[in-house]
Amino acid sequence: MAAMQAEEKRAQAKTMKAVRFHSFGGPEVLRYEDVPKPETGAGEVLVRIRAAGVNPIDWKVRSGYMSEMFRNRLPMIPGVDMAGVVEEVGGDITGYKAGEEVYGYLGVPHGGTYAEYCKAGYFALAPMPRSLDFVEAAALPLVSLVGWQTLFDIAHLDKGQTVLIHGASGGVGHMAVQLAKWRGATVIGTASARNADFLSSLGVDEVIDYQKVRFEDAARDVDVVLDTQAGDTQQRSYQVLKKDGIMVSTLGIENPDEAAKYGVRATGFLAQPNGTELRQIARLIDEGKLKPTVSTVMPLKDVARAHDQSETGHVRGKIVLKVSD
């Protein structure tokens, strides 16, 4: 009874616990502190967050990436995706009700999920997969939407085609692999040798150990390349595509004129919030077609350690911050 009363008082409070950074820099700028609880407006839903995913965009923004876009938002709560429970619904919304379990990707530059509460546009949310807990569901929104939107909405990957996925064991990569296999494509994935068995278990048809083999020597006539690495990897990827094939990069195209030299296409990409696609993804999860991999779970107050780990670039699947029980 006392625990329930404490929780009710906390829900009624005008402040909440959150992580913020007041200036750009390393993980040391992250502060776990009391901040104003968000208030919802028209078309918005207030969500009590149970868990939040850690994504590279979180620490890139914290370190000063696109600082001109975010400077006026300081102090800022990082985080762009989460899973939780609907606390309050804007008066003009009929699709959600208090107590409903949801997950969602809020988008860049909005975000703010490293906190006990966040407000989200109704279009960014979807009912949580019934077969997952909050931690597993929080690992999904951004990476699953990146996989869906790059492979299907942009590249139009179809049954019988071949896709090369760079960084296939990472957050985006491991979900993109499963989506491509569900669609009926042949999947080639680059990864280190330690992740070969993991990728094989996800259905990857050919794993290329990038530390021992140059992928352009092993892959040919690929329909789609999903680039999550940029730099030299992106440049070398043009030569593995078949004529009129397409490369989609989550990090932007560095030399746009290169694609024409090879007779292929290339486009950068920024994920968009999409509750409709998250509903489709939830159905696939509950049907056993997709499964998120969570490598590490940490409490919200240990966010600096989570960022340190994410910045190594060698995380299998996702890191998730547990916000509340």
Image (cartoon, helix red, strand yellow):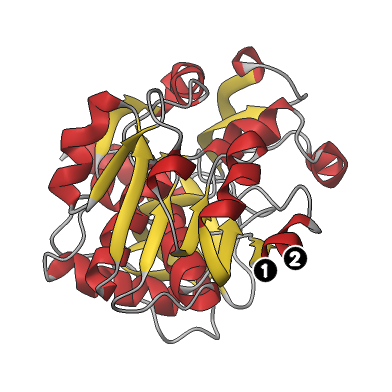
Q: Report the front residue among 81 and 214.
A: 214
Image coordinates of residue 159 in percent, x first then y, are 29, 78
User: Which mark is on residue 263?
Assistant: 1
- Circle 1 packing at 10 Å, graded few (<14), some (14-19), many (20+), is some
Image coordinates of residue 254 in percent, x first then y, are 76, 47
Question: In the rendered image, which quarter contains the N terminus?
Answer: top left
C-alpha separation, residue under disc 2 versus residue under disc 1: 5 Å
Q: Do the residues under discs 2 and 1 have CB atoms within 8 angstroms?
A: yes
Rendered view: 94 above or below 134? below
Q: Amino acid at mark 1?
A: Gly
Q: Residue at x 65, y 47 (%)?
A: 251
Rendered view: 58 above or below 102? above
Q: Using the rendered view, name the quadrant where residue 210 is placed.
A: top left
Q: Amino acid at mark 2?
A: Ala
Is there any visible trace of residue 119 in the rendered image?
yes
Question: In the rendered image, which quarter contains the C terminus?
Answer: top left
Q: Report the front residue among 50 and 111.
A: 111
Q: Which residue is mark 2?
A: 260
Q: Report the front residue among 155 and 76.
A: 155
Image coordinates of residue 72 in percent, x first then y, are 86, 42
Rendered view: 78 above or below 275? above
The residue lying furthest to the top in this view is 28
Q: Residue at x 47, y 78 (%)?
A: 156
**Figure label count:** 2
